[in-house]
Amino acid sequence: MSATSRLAGLPARFARGERGGITSICSAHPIVIEAALLEGIATGCDVLIEATCNQVNQEGGYTGMTPADFRQFVEDIATRLGFDTSRLILGGDHLGPNPWKHLPADEAMQRADVMMDAFVRAGFTKIHLDTSMGCLGEPVALPDAVTAERAARLARIAEQAAVEAGYDLPVYIIGTEVPIPGGAMEALDHLELTKPAAAIETVEVHRRAFAALGLQDAFSRAIGVVVQPGVEFGNENVVVYDSAKATALSGVLRQMPQFVFEAHSTDYQPQQALAALVHDGFAILKVGPGLTFALREALFGLDQIAAFLDRLPEEETLRGKMEKLLLAEPKNWEKYYHGDADDLRLQRHFSYSDRIRYYWPHPQASAAVDALLKRLEGRTIPETLISQNLATLYPAVAAGKVSATPHALMVEAVRNVVRSYNRAALSLQPA
């Protein structure tokens, strides 16, 4: 059985009373990919890695990679680590007109058509259809019928591309109440959960739209619905899952055994909350900024160590160099962060939204990271400085489980996050 087939079996297993799921790694950072694959090797389980429409598309996205480039990028890391790629599932996240929503709908959807074809021809077999956003001249949120019609249009392209390319036919994720990629842009104190009737209607409106295009077989491979279960993060706070509040929503799955729920924006949820989500049928746990947030913590911890050892002035530190870059090129954060100068400085580096992640591929940021790693290369980092600046990693280092080298420490920081997800999700995975 292929990894995609095992993924497709999640709803049937949930309907039988089994509880488990899969972690969806939503990142294009090589350290994050390495950490996820190493956890896959350690557990012997499938690894699902997803690229969003903004990260990766036919025009390169903000990573500069096409879907084919991204596949090669991930598989090269897998080969280096010795990960069995038959256990790798590649997903396309938020595939739709979002990167071009500033254009008229016809033009935006034409580009989404091309993107969908490119993703499926590159071997992406988990497809999140997200056409929920309005384009130029349209309302921000579209009627469900329009969203479903556009989703079905993209599914038709995906089906043809998969047949022609010889890959497994895709499994689909649908939904109309889709959180924006990357987290909320404001402080949060509560969330409105998806109404049970709305979840049912989402499925039915998509069923009709797919049938209108003769795509009943494709719809039979729709396995997940994106809903709002009451989890989200903003720049400064996290709304933690409350199972009791989601009882009615979770109960809807008994009426639609073809589906489980896909939970977006689960970053920073405590492990107990993640386990509760899986138990309640939110079997696909998506995480992205929380992974690069952990990586940034490790980088800044190493930066503090280097600054102490070498008595560095602020402008020579990684954080100082990143601040200079963030101020010089504010387009990836200035619309999302709010407050006075001190608030903005804090958010640029330490926001839960982790918009600093968009800058790590930048040549200046890459050079700054390389300079930090070169400064620490070949040196023994004192355990006491690890305890001071990388406290969550100290126990593993002190126990001899992780070497006190920059690369090992960065990978371990991300693996800690992946482990918490896998502990919640992996009970259905094969040994």
Image: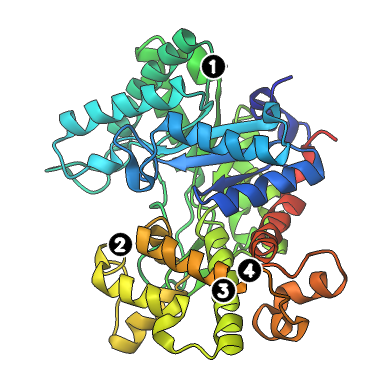
Q: Relative to the observer, which residue lies in front, 62 or 106?
A: 62
Would you name the residue on which mark 4 appears?
Answer: 377
The quadrant of the image that shows the N terminus is top right
**N-terminal of the two: label 2 or label 3?**
2
Residue 339: name its quadrant.
bottom left
Q: Amino acid at mark 4?
A: Glu
Q: Disc count in the image?
A: 4
Q: Which residue is mark 1?
A: 169
Q: Is residue 174 left or right of residue 47?
A: left
Q: Quadrant of residue 340?
A: bottom left
Residues under labels 1 and 3: Cα distance? 48 Å
**Distance (Cα) linking label 4 and label 3:** 6 Å
Q: Nearer the viewer, residue 395 or 428?
A: 395
Residue 374: give x, y in percent of width and height.
Answer: 56, 68
Q: Nearer the viewer, mark 1 or mark 4?
A: 4
- Which residue matches tag 2? 332
Q: Is residue 238 left or right of residue 269?
A: left
Q: Which residue is mark 3?
A: 375
Q: Amino acid at mark 1?
A: Leu
**Mark 4 and 3 residues: CB-CB less than 8 Å, in contact?**
yes
Q: Earlier in the sequence, mark 1 or mark 3?
A: 1
Q: In the rendered view, does 213 fall on the left or right side of 380?
A: left
Q: Position of residue 306 (x, y in %)?
A: 58, 81
Q: Position of residue 158 (x, y in %)?
A: 42, 19
User: Looking at the image, is mark 2 or mark 4 nearer the viewer?
Assistant: 4
Identify the secondary structure beneath mark 4.
Answer: loop
